[in-house]
Image (tube, rainbow, N blue to C red):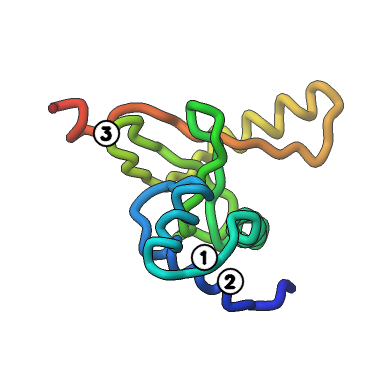
Amino acid sequence: MKRNTWQREAVREALDRTEGFISAQALHSDLHRSGSSIGLATVYRALGDLASTGEADSLQSPEGEAIYRACSTTGHHHHLICRNCGLTVEIAADEVESWAQRIAAEHGFTEAAHVVDVFGLCEACAKA
């Protein structure tokens, strides 16, 4: 278990205050605006640690950038993410789980893992 440093706690608290997903650079900027002296490399490390322990969700944006948010669901799950406003809904996807395991087994793979995030427009953005 990682030691809970003031830097890690500052990143966790900033992530908790953030709506939706945010990049490490944007979170670092937010922290600096609020007076923190934390370094960018430390923010990246803390976010990686939080993601590895399940305290943060991490995914790749459509532009290829790693983005993070405080995780409200424990265990493996997926997301619906609005491309316009960033609204994120955590979803279970039993069909995806079954499909991934079946396809992996058909090809002789074991210990298969996957990431499924669906990007689209939420109802409000689609109406606008």
Instruction: Pinpoint residue 17: horizontal percent, then vertical percent.
Output: 36, 64
Relative side of 25 to 110, left or right: left
Q: Residue at x 50, y 71 (%)?
A: 10
Name the image quarter holding residue 107. Answer: top right
Name the image quarter holding residue 115. Answer: top right
Q: Secondary structure at mark 1?
A: helix
Q: Nearer the viewer, mark 3 or mark 2?
A: 2
Q: Residue furthest right?
A: 108
Which residue type carries mark 1? Val
Relative side of 54 to 122, left or right: right
Q: Mark 1 or mark 3: name the one nearer the start of the chain.
A: 1
Residue corresponding to mark 3: 122
- Kindly identify which numbered label has been placed on residue 127: none
Which residue type carries mark 3? Cys
Name the image quarter holding residue 102. Answer: top right
In the image, 107 versus 12, the foreground residue is 12
Residue corresponding to mark 1: 11
Residue corresponding to mark 2: 7
Q: Quadrant of the N terminus?
A: bottom right
Q: Residue at x 54, y 57 (%)?
A: 56
Q: Quadrant of the C terminus?
A: top left
Mark 2 in CB contact with mark 1 (< 8 angstroms):
yes
